[in-house]
Image (cartoon, rainbow, N blue to C red):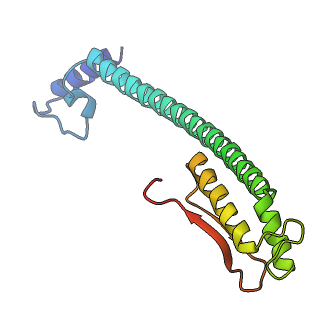
Amino acid sequence: ILLQSIHLLYHSFRIAGASDRLPIRAFPIVLMKGGLASRLAIFSSLVALVATATVGFMVYRGAEKSLMRAAADRVTHTDETVRVRIWANLEGIGNDVRFLAETPPVQGIVRARLRRGLDPETAIRDDEWGEQLAEIFRAFLVSRASYVQARFIGTAPDGSELVRVERKDGD
């Protein structure tokens, strides 16, 4: 109907003696090439383009949120795993320190230091106890590859090392 109205308007304008050239501003629809079908096709294409862009944007936002949640879950899981491993390692280190503290040479060195270098219970000097403790430290380092050195530090204010054993070149 619209096309027929425009067509009639165009013919009545020509009959009235207007030139064959119509002013562009007067009849912009008439100067468009193609009929109603082309305009509907263009309109449908624009609607489809807007709909596709909208759906694409919504899918993008949903995927982005999903990926962000998955990344946050991964970070939380990794954090928990690292925390558990650190606490397990600290517990293991604590057990090792308690074990070494209870060895006879450590107790003997403490007693000997309190009695001017001689253990009153065993009559062993503190340097002899130190040699025994060094042997225990060597065996300990062999059995625990993660440790680089073992030291026994005195309680004096200067914190001097009484016994020290280090791993050399992986040995």
Q: Residue furthest bottom?
A: 157
* Left or right relative to 23: residue 114: right
Q: Residue furthest right?
A: 121
At horizontal 76% and vertical 62% (from top left) the residue drawn is 105
At horizontal 68% and vertical 74% (from top left) the residue drawn is 162
- Closer-to-camera residue (108/170): 108
* Left or right relative to 28: residue 96: right
Question: Based on the displayed image, in which of its 4 quarters is residue 30 positioned?
Answer: top left
* Left or right relative to 47: residue 9: left
Image x and y of residue 65, in percent: 57, 36
Image x and y of residue 156, in percent: 77, 83
Above or below — where is 10 with respect to 157?
above
Please identify the quadrant where the N terminus is shown: top left
Image x and y of residue 14, in percent: 16, 26
Above or below — where is 81 with respect to 116?
above
At horizontal 36% and vertical 24% (from top left) the residue drawn is 43
